Image: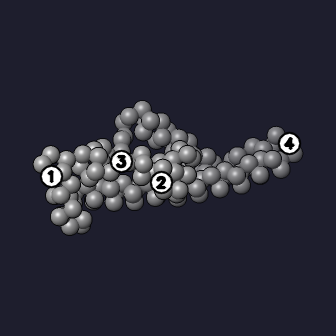
Amino acid sequence: MSCSEDSVREFQETAVERCAEHELLRQQRTHLERLLYRKKYLCKELQLLYLQIDKTRNYQEFLDVLTHSRPLLREIFTMESQQRAVQAGNLRAPDIDWVDKFGINLEDYVVDNDRLLSLYNEGLL
């Protein structure tokens, strides 16, 4: 038997709750769900801010809207700098060799799942 088949059999015989990879994936999923929720919230808040800015009639009103929205803008810029750090490679998602370990092709799995595919297309996955 090949090493891949042994790994798959061992994985199938182990309770999922005791599997270290499962725990790692569960933590990663929780993190990504929180990040997705936060991004959706910030997107909604930004849309509201754009509407407020669009209604301004002069420079002073524009400054008042921005000053009033300072916490939101700070949060957005903080999130942007964190994303740059992630994209620079400082923080990475866990690497799991899906094909050798579990016999799963991750790309096919994402393509077959409409929700995951839409998240991938939006740049959130």
How far is the residue under mark 2 from the one under mark 1?
26 Å
Lateral position of residue 114 relative to residue 86, left or right: right
**Which residue sits at x=38%, y=34%?**
89
Q: Which of the labelled discs sits on residue 52, or is there none? A: none
Cα separation between marks 2 and 3: 11 Å
Which residue is more in the foreground, 89 or 105? 105
Q: Amino acid at mark 4?
A: Asn
| Residue of label 1 | 6
Disc 1 from disc 4: Cα separation: 70 Å
Residue receiving disc 2: 112
Q: Secondary structure at mark 3?
A: loop
| Residue located beneath label 3 in the image | 105
Farthest top residue in view? 88
Give the mark nearest the N terminus, 1 or 4.
1
Confirm whether residue 51 shows in the render.
yes
The CA span between labels 4 and 2 is 51 Å
**Front position among marks 4 and 2:** 2
User: Amino acid under label 1?
Assistant: Asp
Q: Quadrant of residue 93?
A: top left
Q: Residues within 10 Å of mark 3 (few under 14, many from 20)?
A: few
Task: Examine the rendering and report whether any part of residue 64 can be seen.
Answer: no
- Which badge, 3 or 1, comes first in the chain's sequence? 1
